[in-house]
Image (spheres, rainbow, N blue to C red):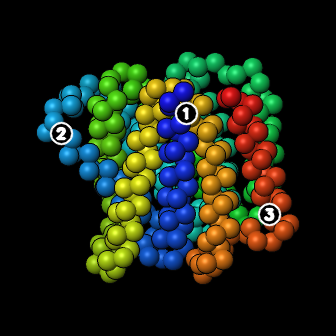
Amino acid sequence: MTWIYLAIIGQFIGAVVVLVDKYLISSKSVSRPAVYAFYVGALSGVVLIILPFGWVLPPTSAIILISLAVAFSYIFSLLFLYNSLETADASDVAPVMGAVSAISTLIFSLIFLDSPLPHNFFIGFLYLIAGTFLMSHFRFDRNAVIYVILAGLLFGLSSVLIKMIFNQTTFINGFFWSRMANVLGAAILLLWPANLKAVIGNLKKSSGETKFLVVGNKAFSGLAFILILAAIKMGDVSVVNALSGIQFIFLFLFAFIFTYRMPEHFHEAVHQKHNLVKKITASGLIIVGLYILFL
């Protein structure tokens, strides 16, 4: 059961990361979502520090190809996630993305890992759809809905692809090459001249505090990611993704605190009674759906 505890701790840290992401994007501390996605991918290069220890083996052609697919799906899932956080509440985005990624993980597991669908799939699916539909009636505009759905689909795909890598090599080797592929994925974002200009401009103009928040938050994100990857390596990828429902609870608690203390950056609709009831109901439906599907 160790992998379940690792996944829960990872989700708690992940909730903190999402909240800081929301602050950095909504406050325009980072000029555009593509810039932030670039930072996340580029900072994956920190794994180079483990190279001298001899733990990393040369990748096979299959690991290279899968790692590149992981990088593409992961970087663009972040890009769509950050776009959705520009206009939508973090506590709205996280449950919808969690529901979509859970479904996509099951489907991609069926395709790539030959994992059978659970016998109660359709019942759990109905709960997820009901909860997601209720949640999407807050302050989601059309673009935010599209972005969060794409983010969930790509995140689910990246989770399954990571499991495929771990099935073929050691944890450290799979982690190293998938992170190095992320650096390449971040570099691809710079092929768009507007993104390149924005990254250069942000590096020059951002304050020391912003740089510290970005690097520190991504360090926490990396820790959460390592814990979740370890849980995926040790356990079932679908169950690990299902435990993302716990992150919703943490986000609600954080939303209560920060929407009052920093209302200029967090406009979470949790202090109004009718919105609070709807959010709790929607998240409850999603968590029940995840439970039925995987647990």
Viewer-nearest of discs 2 and 1:
1
What percent of the width, then of the height, locates residue 254?
62, 63
Residue position marked by numbered label 2 in the rendering:
51
Question: How far across and down, in percent of the image, does residue 164 sit?
Answer: 43, 26
Q: What's the CA distance linking mark 3 and mark 1?
A: 29 Å
Q: Secondary structure at mark 1?
A: helix
Query: Disc 3 vs disc 1: which is toward the camera?
Result: 1
Residue 139's image quarter?
Answer: bottom right
Can residue 14 be seen in the rendering of this structure? yes
Of the pair 109 and 239, the residue shown nearer to us: 239
Earlier residue among tags 3 and 1: 1
Disc 3 element: helix
Q: Which mark is residue 230?
A: none
| Vertical arrangement, residue 253 with respect to residue 231, above or below | below
User: Going 44% across and 40% down the picture, which residue do you hit?
Assistant: 227
Q: How many marks?
A: 3
Residue type of the residue flagged with mark 1: Ile
Q: Earlier in the sequence, mark 2 or mark 1?
A: 1
- The residue labelled by disc 3 is 276
Are the residues flagged by discs 3 and 1 in contact, CB closer than 8 Å? Answer: no
Residue located beneath label 1 in the image: 4
- Classify residue 108 as left or right of residue 249: left
Query: From the image, which quarter does the N terminus lie in?
Result: top right
Q: What's the residue type where badge 2 is placed?
A: Leu
Q: Secondary structure at mark 2?
A: helix
- Residue visible at 50% across and 52% down? 13
Residue at image point 50% right, 31% down: 3
Horizontal and vertical percent for residue 212? 34, 70
